[in-house]
Image (cartoon, rainbow, N blue to C red):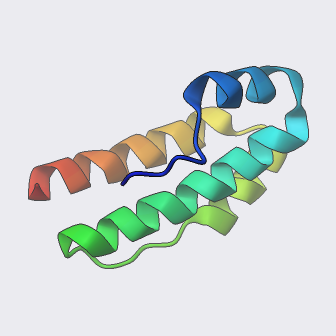
Amino acid sequence: MNDESSDPGIDLLLCIFCFPYQLYWFYKYGKIMAEANARVGLPREDNSVLYLIMGFFGLHFVNAAIMQSNLNRIWDVV
């Protein structure tokens, strides 16, 4: 995925210093991973709203674990 709108350095700084951006980041990357699932032939699981809700309640580590599991599934297919 060639997404020029994503800059990891800026994302990191904004996530550290701006809580609302963290919520946006979880939602945004949830959508990106749903698209990645569809590209490799997996069912399109759009967990972006789940990530947003759990991020709001401070469950960032759970979001990270779910995202990593999803990325591992994508990697197994590729």
Residue 22 placed where, x, y %?
A: 76, 39
Residue 57 visible:
no
Residue 50 visible:
yes
Residue closest to the far front: 4
Residue 12, by quadrant, is top right
Viewer-proximal residue among 62 and 51 = 51
Residue drawn at (36%, 54%) of the image: 1
Q: Is residue 13 placed above or below 22 in the rendered structure?
A: above
Residue drawn at (69%, 26%) of the image: 10
Residue 47 placed where, x, y %?
A: 55, 66
Question: Where, quadrant-wise, is the C terminus in this rendering?
Answer: bottom left
Q: Is residue 22 placed above or below 76 in the rendered structure?
A: above
Relative to residue 16, is residue 47 drawn left or right?
left
Viewer-proximal residue among 18 and 63 = 18
Residue drawn at (44%, 68%) of the image: 34
Residue 51 placed where, x, y %?
A: 65, 55
Residue 57 placed where, x, y %?
A: 82, 45
Q: Is residue 61 placed above or below 28 in the rendered structure?
A: above
Viewer-proximal residue among 27 and 61 = 27
